[in-house]
Amino acid sequence: MKKVLSSVVVASAFMASMAFASNEVKVGSLKIENPQARATVPAQKMSGGFMKIENAGAADKLISASSSVSKSMELHTMSMENNVMKMREVKAIELPAKSTVELKPGGLHLMFIDLNKQLNAGDIIPIKLKFEKAGEVEVKFQVMGNKPPAHGQPGHDHSKHH
Ligand SMILES: [Cu+2]
């Protein structure tokens, strides 16, 4: 993470650190921390979004997400089936009372479907999240990730994802 920052946005390191500092959003009894999206290579149509959701109150659910950079967004889970990592869509992401749920690579995640632009490390992508009880909130996701490989080939992370 530090390496990406220093090589890509040396000049705006100060602004980047400010973006990180404000990277925590509260809505109702939920606190959303460290929202991140994964960088893409040109022509890549999907990517993943990750965050940590702390629920200090009663049980809630994340029921949908949307952004202006993709046609739609889905809620996904990933699991091992016959030694192969598989993703599938889930209707909602459960947020049990007084617990923390982490969306992270290899597990639950947001999925950008049909991206209309490339996501570059350092970009800020506003995503609207809708919770059953807490309602709607816009969260700024920071794009993190590897620099696109030299020949426009998908990186190892992406080939695994789809
Ligand atoms: Cu997915």
Image: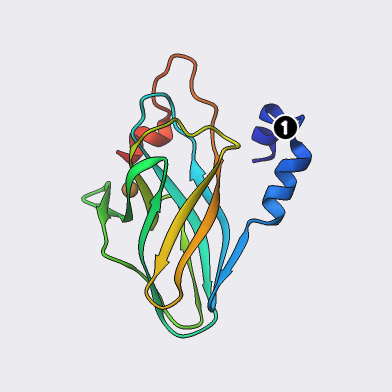
Instruction: Name the residue: 31% across, 67% down.
Output: 92
Could you say which is closer to the camera, residue 102 or residue 45? 45
In the picture, residue 35 is in which quadrant?
A: bottom right
Note whether residue 107 is visible.
Answer: no
Could you say which is closer to the camera, residue 161 or residue 35? 35
Q: Is mark 1 within 8 Å of ligand 1?
A: no
> Which residue position is annotated with label 1?
6
Q: Is residue 54 above or below residue 1?
A: below
Name the residue furthest left: 82
Instruction: Name the residue: 72% across, 32% down.
Output: 6
Instruction: Name the residue: 38% across, 53% down.
Output: 66
Name the residue furthest top: 151
Could you say which is closer to the camera, residue 136 or residue 162? 136
Note whether residue 137 is visible.
Answer: yes
Q: Is residue 75 above or below residue 125?
A: below
Q: Is residue 158 above or below residue 37?
A: above
For the C terminus, the image quarter is top left
Q: How many marks?
A: 1
- Mark 1 secondary-structure assignment: helix
**Residue 31, percent across and down?**
57, 70
**Residue 95, percent across and down?**
42, 74
For the N terminus, the image quarter is top right
**Residue 116, percent across and down?**
37, 33
In the picture, residue 63 is in which quadrant?
A: bottom left
In the image: residue 142, left or right of residue 131: right
Give the image's coloring scheme.
Answer: rainbow
Inspect the image, locate mark 1, and give the three-letter code of the amino acid beneath it. Answer: Ser
Instruction: Name the residue: 53% across, 32% down.
Output: 120
Q: Residues within 10 Å of mark 1 (few under 14, many from 20)?
A: few
Name the residue furthest bottom: 58
In the image: residue 134, left or right of residue 161: right
**Residue 77, percent across and down?**
32, 57
